[in-house]
Amino acid sequence: MDPIGGMKIWRVNLSRQSLDIEDVPETWQYLGGRSLLARVLLDEVPPTCEPLGPLNKLVFAPGLLVGHMLSSCDRISVGAKSPLTGGIKESNAGGSTGLHMTNMGMRALILEGQPTQPEWWVVHLSLQGARFDPADDLAGLGVYETARVLLERYGKKVAIALIGPGGEMRLASAGIQNLDKDRVPARINARGGMGAVLGSKGVKAIIFDDASGKKPPITHPDAFKQAQKAYNQALMGHPQIAIYRDYGTAGNARMCDGFGGLPTRNFSSGHFEQVEQISGEYMREILLARGGESEPTHACMLGCTIRCSNIFGGEDGKAIVSPLEYETIGLMGSNLEIASLDTIARMNWQVNDLGLDSIEVGAALGVAAEAGLFAFGDGERALELLDEIRRGTPLGRLLGSGAGMTGKVLGVTRVPVVKNQAMSAYEPRAIKGTGVTYATSPQGADHTAGLTIRAKVDHLDPIGQASLSRTVQINVAGYDSLGACTFAGFGFAAAPESIRDLLNARYDWQVGTDILQVLGREALRLEREFNRQAGFTAADDRLPEFMIHEPLPPHDAVFDVPDEDLDEVFNWL
Amino acid sequence: MVVEVHLHTTLQRVEMGRDRRRLLMELPPGSTLGDVLSQLEIKLEPEHLLLVINGRSAEPEQPLSDGDIIHLIPAISGGS
């Protein structure tokens, strides 16, 4: 019996410009997305290797449920050894790449090797094989223009994963961008410098052409349909869905501020006096009033019923950027004391076009403001600094190398990073469970690795936060292995047996209801092992010193979860 | 006593065609968070609400003091 329905590993070697299509090794067969790429990296990449050198590999792995337009379940995991953290990295995005990969029968795509000449290539993948098209003419082009040219060149039906000038410069904050369902290249594997790794392999873009492809087979279609129905009903009946549909993630701005956990002026306060002007509620009002191309409700993937995304239009109704998400609003808004959504949207467009992570760059700008490089609140100067990145000046490259590097060079010690990766827009001194996640996740500070803000606990109390973070970290590592969006979790949490039933129907497996946690634990185990071999110790599982000692207004909170609790997060290993 | 109430996302009130999400409420001494919920006729069950007083998660029974800042957030655990 073939337990994965004939899907294969596609291996592209950039040194030889070759493609091999291989059977999936037995130990990889029950894994997908985040857990699969952790297994591949641990098996094939020396953990001490140079992240931008020829020994590192970049892995694209759709989750186990990708390919069936199950609402919010077509996500793609991209991973490699991170040039930002020096550890393992999985970065997750929506868009159409995952769906095209499974239509082509790809369980995972592994990019390895490195060209010897400094040339740029477009890797074209189709059922006819791989083609390596010269792409020096695209070098230096922004993400939006590159995507436009590529869609013209390769047709409108392809999926594309591409980098911008940031990835070409191998900046540690560079991401990989994917097309959304409307072919806008803004679904980003943003975190941890995956775009720099793709750039180090001389690849400007990968084209996934699924012509003549077909949906991956389902062993028991009726059972699948039934499980899908149970999941959809649970998802659509969930009260949280209407909130994300109408307000998107931007609804979190006032929530975080209400908890005293909205990063403000380089993580020196948890309350932003002008939170109203950057709130999701206000954003919805102005988008509805502006009309035109503005849309407060927009889907990033085909078949998504949540539609938490948006198109942010300016006063003239013309789109400035899509989407504008809470984490960008926090890091480029309150964190820089910029209270104008229009300015934040313009900055977001620039960062997207450069192909960078808006969280990392926002945090780097906060550190730069603290160092006196520009005044908090000066949005125009912040935009000029983004232009320095585009021009590749030393200052621009510094900012594009992330908050940690910026702090070191500019002599700032209030630097909100763990494992050299910037924190997202949830202050860990006020939301302590998320602080535990930042400290201990093998991914570095990353809210998507285990956000605890929706739990009904006293977020200021250090007691119990480690165990809360453990539960959430395991669950999200499971969702990342399924290809499920974190918001799909609302449906799965209400109908947990549907995960088991979907997997068993799809693959003819006999997994139990704990499969989400089984996958999550395995992903975390493999990631921890990779990092251990890369030289990480418990000392790396800590928040920056200032957060232990410096009281955060308005609650004068410090991060006081004991080190012993942090060291117990992975207590099953 | 007077408390400041912040209504989040779907709990905003529409007044004169505009959303209103921050209000001051005058309450008799001894009032609780539950009194605020019933006075505002909030239909969501408490388990579908994050109740926050002065930055800390709270329960409906919690008594209020003058100047308290209250956030009522439609959300429940799960998801991430």
Image (spheres, coloured by chain):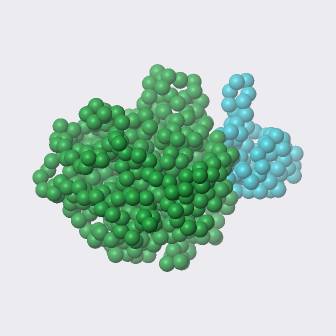
Q: Image quadrant of residue A179?
A: top left
A365 displayed left or right of B62: left
Q: Which of these two is toward me, A498 or A387?
A: A498
Q: Hue of chain B?
A: cyan
- In the image, what residue occupies the spot 48% across and 33% down? A311
* Residue A381 horizontal/vertical position (percent): 36, 37
B21 displayed left or right of A369: right
- In the image, what residue occupies the spot 56% across and 75% down? A565
Q: Which of these two is toward me, B5 or A113?
A: A113
Asked whether residue A240 appears in the rendered view, the answer is no
- In the image, what residue occupies the spot 54% across and 42% down? A304
* Residue A391 horizontal/vertical position (percent): 23, 40
Asked whether residue A176 appears in the rendered view, the answer is yes
Q: Is residue A367 above or below residue A460?
A: above
* Residue A393 horizontal/vertical position (percent): 23, 44
User: Which part of the image, by quadrant, shows the N terminus of chain A?
Assistant: bottom left
- In the image, what residue occupies the spot 74% across and 56% down? B58
